Structures are given as C-alpha cells and as structure tokens.
Image (cartoon, helix red, strand yellow):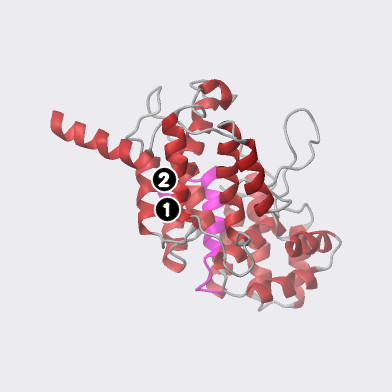
Amino acid sequence: MTPPPPLGRSRNKEGPAFEAALDDHELATVRDALARGRWADARQLLARTGDDWDRRGHRLVVLAEGPTSVAWAREWQLAEPDSPDAAALLACATVARAVHGKDTPDAARALCLAAAAMAPRDPTPWLGILILARRTGTDGERVRAFDQVRARHRDHHHAHHLMAACLAEHQDGDRDDPLHEVYDFASWAAEQAPADSPLAVLPVVAHAERYRVLARAGLEPADPARSGHWGTRRARQVMKAAFDWWLEWDVDDGTAHPRRKVDLNFLAHAKLHEGRPAEAAALLTRIGPHATHAPWSYPDRDPRKAFRAARRAALGAA
C-alpha cells in the first residue's frame, strides 16, 4: 500500500477523489504529458530521479497507472530498447493492467523480471512483482518479492506499506488480536529503520490497515468515529509515541521535509479528532496545500507494548 494520497474534490458520493502524485507537482505534470504521448518527459524525469529508490518507485507506479501508459512505454522501448527506465515503466504499467484484470499476471511478471535483469540494483521491478503478488499471488510469492526489494533498498517505504497491508488481510478470528503478525512486522521494521525514516510510523499504519480489514469484514464500524478509538487516551498515546520518535522539522526554512508531509497528516488528523482544531490547523499549514486525508482510525492500543505484554502473558501461562 502507498501512503494516503491527498484529499481532492469528490467525484461522487462514494468518497473523495485522490491525487496519486501527492505533492510531487513535477510528477503530476509528466504524468499528464505521458498521457498525451510525450514519453520523453518521463525519460527526463526518471533520469533526474536517479537512484532515489523510494521516489523512483512512487513515480513509476503513478506514471504506470495511466490508461495509455503501456502503449507509450512500448513506443519508448522501441525507440530505446536498452533503456532500463522504459523497461521499468512498461513492467509497472502492465502490472497495473493485470491488477485490474486487463492483462495476465504471467505477462506482467515476465516484464518485471526482464526489467530487473536490465537494472539489477533497482528495487522497482520487484516492487511491481510485490504489487502483483498482493492481488494475484501467494503468501510465499509476496514474501519473496518483498525480500528482493529489501535486499536492494532496506528501508523501501512503499514495499513496507504493501507488506503491512498484505499481513493485515490475514483474517484470524473475529477480533483485533494483539499478537497478529502485522503488528509484529511493523514493530520489527520500525526498530530496524534509521531514526529519521518514515518507517518509524509503520506501527500506526499497521493499525490503520488492520482496522480496514476488520471494518470490511463487519467486525468494526465502517465509520471509525463510531468505534470509539479516536477518543481514547491510549489512541492518543499511540500517536504521540510514534511522532515523538520520528518527527522533526528541517532547519533550513522551518517547513516539513517533503517526504514527511504524508506522515505528518496522521498527527494533524489525530488532533482534529481530539478536538484540538487550532493545533491541527497549524500542522496542516506547515504541511502545505496538499495535506492528505486519513481514512481510518486506529485500535485503542500501543502496538509494541501490547504485543510484548501479550507475549509475556502467553509465555507465563505456558
């Protein structure tokens, strides 16, 4: 799963319209150009992105989602058959089609493997395989794809979000089990990540993903406000622990680093639900005009403390 995208204007009553490019204005411009066949703009964007693997993955996934992206990626590849960027875009675009049932998973996987062979250091083709495996593969295929991404970029943001989503979808029992593997995974990943990594908030993401699964199964209210989680003291403690650990402002201009904007959104919306609109407004102002929408709540629990306490209790009972 990618970080929650910005809240846009609703297209219908079903829900809000989301801007997949987030606050990457350059990406949004190039995506529109690619839709008109100007694949050279995509080539230049990816060349400038270099080996910033998190940004490269995000940009390729967004560019790949266009309905004509496969056609223009093929044209680019015909013009430059040795371009790993063209191969990666074609692979990701075919994955997007396969996820929506418009192409075969085997074809998408083959293109991802071909792109991976052209750029062995790039985790993005393996990210494509992970996206594909989430919808069409087995647990083993998802784990293997995640391991391949992590072998190339240990702290890959998108891949960790996807694995949290995959693990959260393992529906065991009829309640939110503090021993559920998604919490163990999120705590492990946060502990392994550098101090300034967005993965520090993965335990919070795990709660959001697990709540999504439980709500879809009818085990939690579809409206998180009815669940009571936002109003509890423990929910506030979960948020505070995550953000005290990770949040800091850039000293250059006093604004949030672009990669932190999405995660700052969670804190802003938590303050809204706590009835502290002035503090929320201040945070959203610092984030900028593309503040995002937090679609889910979080269970009433500190994930790391709850997991450890439950494990100690289980060991004691044994």
Marks 1 and 2 in Cβ contact (< 8 Å): yes
Q: Is residue 2 visible?
A: no
Q: In this view, does 246 lie above or below 115?
A: above
Instruction: Please tell me which residue lies in front, 55 or 308.
Output: 308
**Residue drawn at (38%, 37%), measured in percent from left and top?**
302
Q: Is residue 193 visible?
A: yes
Which residue in the rendered view is the most extreme toward the front? Answer: 278
Relative to 316, say whether 193 is above or below: below
Quadrant the C terminus occupies: top left
Query: Would you say 298 lies left or right of 6 here?
Result: left
Q: How crowded is mark 1: few (under 14 residues within 10 Å), some or many (20 or more)?
A: few
Front residue of 285/227: it is: 285
| Mark 1 vs mark 2, CA separation in Å | 6 Å
Q: Mark 2 points at which residue?
A: 241
Amino acid type at mark 2: Ala
Q: What residue is shown with label 1? A: 245
- Left or right: residue 175 versus residue 215 is left
Quadrant of the image occupied by residue 295: top right
User: Which residue is drawn at the image coordinates 20% and 31% (left, top)?
Assistant: 313
Residue 221 at x, y percent in the picture: 55, 21
Stretch of the chain drawn in magenta: 119-143
Q: How many marks?
A: 2
Q: Where is residue 135 in the image (x, y as percent from the top left)?
A: 55, 43
SS state under label 2: helix
Residue nearest the observer in this picture, 182 or 134: 182
Q: Is residue 183 magenta?
A: no
Q: What's the amino acid at mark 1?
A: Trp
Q: Is residue 28 left or right of residue 197?
A: right
Q: Magenta residues: mostly which secondary structure?
A: helix
